[in-house]
Amino acid sequence: MSRAIEWILLGSASCLAIIAGVRWHRPSRVGPWLLLAGSVAAIAVGDVFYAAGAMPAAEACYLSMFVLVAAALVQFTRGGSLLVERARLIDLLACACSALLVVWVFMIGDNVLTGKISAADVIGDLLLIAVTGRLVLAAGHNRAATLLLAGSVGMLASDIVYPVAPGLVTEAGYIVLYVTWGLAALHPSMTRLTRPMPPRATPWRGHWAALLGAAVATPPAVLLVEALHGEIHDGVVIAVAGGLTLLLTITRLADSISQNSQAAARERALRTASGALVAAADPPAVEAAVHAAVGQLMPASSLRSLVFAIDDQAVPAAPSGPSPRSWWADESTLVCPLRLEPLAVARPSGGALIVEAQREVLAVTRDALEVLAGQAALALDRISLVEAVGRRDSDQYLRTVIGNTAELMLVIDDDQRIRYASPAVHDLLGDEPFTPLSTLTDLVHPDDRGEVRRAFQSNGDGMLFCSLRRADESQILIEATYRDLREDRLVRGYVVTMRNVTAAHDPGERQPHRDHVDELPAWVNRRSAQHKFRY
């Protein structure tokens, strides 16, 4: 009875340690650890029944433990986990299970010394060691994976030695199992074992399919051989091995079906997005197409927020080094910069697609989101080029139409850069053609530059008076009327119409209306005062 109490205390402590580790570290998937806690509880209950002499109940608990462990391992190695390519692992495990069955039935089963050893337990232990060993290799220096492997080795050692020579020493492996699995859940590195990773597509190879088919056919073949030779001695072993092999095969097929359906859904969403982005005529249409595509790429329940930034003002800083196609801003936020994919460079104005969702979903759809961001960048760049060509054609049309008129006209950008100047402006100022970087403030007298800047910083149309400097340093007083056409897709700037009120032939136009006297440049007011008091 005391041994039963000891096993109850050990099992309870290990289960509580696993649950506490899950609550403290909060891994991205808690299912594998809860299944692992259930398997430990099943072992502890089986040990209690074994100590009490209830062997059938103990065997049932041990078998249920392997079922729970198998489910936990499936969760540990599912798509998007640390093992980014588990298809080969499943194939190898199925083959190893069938090979161990053949070795046990035809080579070890009739040995008197090993007759007391449970073949099902040994096969299950070896498969558990294979999976945990693969986790150790994939995780690198991960204490949690190493502790899981140590507990599996301890259980295998006790399953082999304890039936032959029962004692406190030979059952120490079970104690190692309880202790190491509890410590594995308490170590902070346990979160890496279920951290989502992008799954790797596994190409179809015929020899792997043949190997998997042979593994599935091996247990029925062994059962047929024993039946033909008389009495069936290893029915339980064959049933357990056949069940494990079938479970692995079904898991392999389910993974293939799931990956194929997900790939088809992503391809369909990207194809739809490509058509919408090609038809988009402005940035809001591009943003609407991107939102619709992201809604098709991932379930709405997993999406927390989506930001489509067309400049770098709201984009988190990228990691140092070469510009990546995407990076993690935090545990659940993926940043995909708007890159021009054919050129493999970012857009000049920057921008990014920022998606906040469950990390597991982001890991699976990361490649599709990067492609979507590239398509959106190309659509925005196409729209900018179309608008630039439209503005160029509009300017060329304007230049052709009013090329022989005396109208003083300027078209300036939002930053007051001169995009077009009528020939009459060049004739008035007597200056050389403007450079591409010339601005309106370069032409204005220094005393009036502040007023001009304030006028164009405000929204809407307006009128102002200012003086322009000619090439011979003389000054010209003008009345400028400007229209704010920055929202016009073909203009995207200000259209400024000027009137020379200094050299007008009509005496009534020589000075502006008295209502605007306060808006006159300072040098005009000074000249009027000097003229008034010159006698």
Image (cartoon, grey):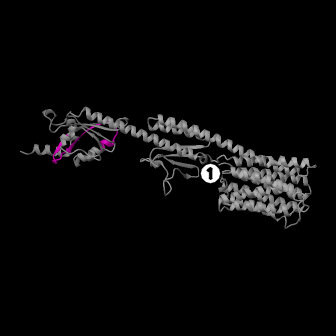
Residue under circle 1?
197
Instruction: Please name whichever residue, 371 or 94, is drawn nearer the observer in this view of the structure.
Output: 94
Q: Is residue 298 above or below residue 59?
A: above
What's the amino acid at mark 1? Met
Instruction: Please name whichever residue, 244 or 39, is drawn nearer the observer in this view of the structure.
Output: 244
Q: At which x and y percent is residue 500?
A: 18, 37
- Residue 316 in view of the camera: yes
Q: At which x and y percent is residue 204?
A: 66, 46
* Identity of the residue furthest to the left in this view: 535
Residue 218 is left or right of residue 25, and the answer is right
Tally of marks: 1
Instruction: Please name whichever residue, 509 or 366, is drawn nearer the observer in this view of the structure.
Output: 366
Q: Quadrant of residue 506?
A: top left
- Residue 460 in view of the camera: no
Please state the extent of the stretch shown in magenta in the rendering.
Answer: 454-477
Q: Quadrant of the C terminus?
A: top left
Q: At which x and y percent is residue 385?
A: 39, 40
Instruction: Please name whichever residue, 10 or 239, is drawn nearer the observer in this view of the structure.
Output: 239
Residue 228 is left or right of residue 252, and the answer is right
Q: Is residue 257 above or below residue 54?
A: above
Residue 309 is left or right of residue 26, and the answer is left
Q: SS for tag 1?
A: loop
Instruction: Give the residue at x 92% y 57%.
Output: 53
* Identity of the residue furthest to the right in this view: 230
Q: Quadrant of residue 272?
A: top right
Q: At which x and y percent is residue 283?
A: 45, 38
Instruction: Give the residue at x 83% y 62%.
Output: 158
Crowd tier of the residue under label 1, counting other residues whose Cα lies within 10 Å: few below 14, some 14–19, many 20 or above: some
Residue 112 is inside the magenta segment: no
Residue 325 is left or right of residue 445, and the answer is right
Q: Quadrant of the N terminus?
A: bottom right
